[in-house]
């Protein structure tokens, strides 16, 4: 496409698949004063808990001024093709493309349809750390918690094209921005903007703070990284040590696992209907929150900066890792915690 065609474009299109991604698109648009100009394409997974949170976040996005449209690419192979075809004119007309999950196979499949001069990657939690590291090294884009399996030619091609797409190009005049709250530094040529959760703090709270303690759950068991029994024992120990009363479940934690936690620890399991960053701003929130390695060890200190809430991080011992956990998983989780302790002076 020529420069004349590019100048005629006016829209920003965002592709999001999770509640956290959607929240961070709102934060990005608020940060740059682009709430009214940003259009959301919500691409939900099949998981019911994620879909409920996405519905709630889509309503908050509309209230904030964004346009949000719901698509269903994962019902079948035919629906995936139909959604890609429906998005095609929007991808062609967009001047800027905002991506929540650069590892998504569907997103990688539609990237060749986009002719944009500006690309933005917003936080998708700790996956952003892997994304930046892989992009800097020039690797294929692969989720950190997935062990290497058989190679697939099509998937390899999509991953390689996505890597090139997210790499700033002087030849094509394409710029790349990373909008993040994580401890990363984008590769040479990328712009980086700090996500301080200014919209969340202005829209909600400050919350009522109770003199109690809570535990924040993770989906490391569901991801196949951590042993379920060892995780349960760890949660029991944390709950007993701090006298915790609630367990904030990650949206991907299974009902069976949560029932076991509730029965074994006496904790009240809470399934928030929005990302935890918003849930804690709505309150009430405990004075002490204890989390295992997770995105929230980096985001909650920013969200709760104007409160007396203290966040503590608990490590995952090497003995907890599943035999099939990917190489380097322990180091990755340790890095998530150690950088959070250093950046935010966490206990």
Image (cartoon, rainbow, N blue to C red):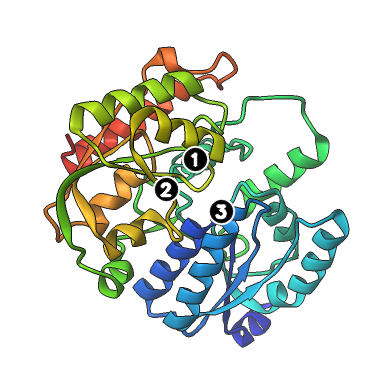
Report how far apart the C-alphas of labels 2 and 3 lie in the structure.
32 Å
Q: Position of residue 308 (x, y in %)?
A: 11, 53
Q: Quadrant of the N terminus?
A: bottom right
Q: Is residue 188 above or below residue 258?
A: below
| Comes first in the chain, label 1 or label 2 | 1
Q: Is residue 294 above or below residue 34?
A: above
Q: Secondary structure at mark 2?
A: loop
Q: Residue furthest right?
A: 78
Please tell me the numbered disc located at residue 49: 3
Residue 15 vs residue 287, the one in the foreground: 287
Residue contact at pointers 1 and 2, CB within 8 angstroms: yes
Please tell me the numbered disc located at residue 341: none
Q: Secondary structure at mark 3?
A: helix
Q: Position of residue 91 (x, y in %)?
A: 69, 72
Report how far apart the C-alphas of labels 3 and 1 lie in the structure.
34 Å
Q: Position of residue 211 (x, y in %)?
A: 12, 48
Nearest to viewer (mark 3 / mark 1)? 3
**Label 1: which residue?**
136
Q: Position of residue 221 (x, y in %)?
A: 51, 29
| Comes first in the chain, label 3 or label 1 | 3
**Label 2: which residue?**
186
């Amino acid at each position: 496409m020529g420069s004349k065609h590019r100048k005629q474009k006016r829209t920003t299109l965002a592709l999001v698949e999770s509640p956290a991604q959607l929240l961070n698109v709102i934060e990005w648009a608020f940060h740059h004063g682009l709430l009214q100009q940003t259009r959301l394409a919500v691409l939900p997974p099949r998981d019911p808990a994620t879909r409920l949170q996405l519905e709630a976040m889509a309503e908050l996005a509309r209230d904030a001024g964004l346009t949000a449209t719901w698509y269903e690419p994962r019902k079948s192979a035919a629906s995936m093709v139909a959604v890609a075809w429906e998005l095609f004119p929007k991808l062609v007309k967009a001047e800027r493309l905002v991506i929540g999950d650069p590892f998504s196979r569907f997103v990688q499949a539609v990237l060749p349809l986009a002719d944009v001069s500006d690309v933005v990657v917003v936080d998708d939690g700790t996956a952003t750390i892997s994304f930046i590291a892989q992009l800097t090294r020039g690797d294929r884009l692969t989720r950190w918690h997935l062990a290497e399996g058989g190679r697939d030619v099509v998937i390899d091609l999509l991953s390689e094209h996505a890597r090139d797409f997210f790499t700033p190009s002087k030849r094509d005049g394409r710029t790349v921005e990373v909008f993040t709250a994580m401890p990363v530094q984008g590769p040479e040529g990328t712009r980086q903007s700090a996500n301080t959760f200014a919209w969340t703090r202005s829209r909600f709270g400050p919350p009522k703070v109770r003199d109690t303690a809570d535990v924040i759950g993770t989906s490391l068991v569901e991801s196949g990284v951590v042993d379920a029994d060892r995780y349960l024992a760890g949660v029991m120990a944390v709950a007993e040590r701090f006298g915790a009363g609630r367990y904030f479940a990650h949206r991907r934690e299974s009902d069976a696992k949560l029932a076991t936690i509730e029965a074994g620890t006496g904790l009240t399991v809470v399934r928030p209907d929005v990302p935890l960053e918003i849930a804690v701003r709505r309150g009430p929130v405990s004075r002490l929150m204890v989390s295992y390695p997770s995105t929230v060890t980096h985001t909650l200190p920013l969200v709760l900066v104007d409160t007396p809430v203290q966040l503590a991080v608990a490590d995952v011992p090497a003995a907890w890792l599943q035999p099939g956990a990917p190489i380097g998983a322990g180091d990755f989780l340790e890095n998530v915690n150690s950088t959070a302790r250093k950046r935010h002076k966490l206990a």
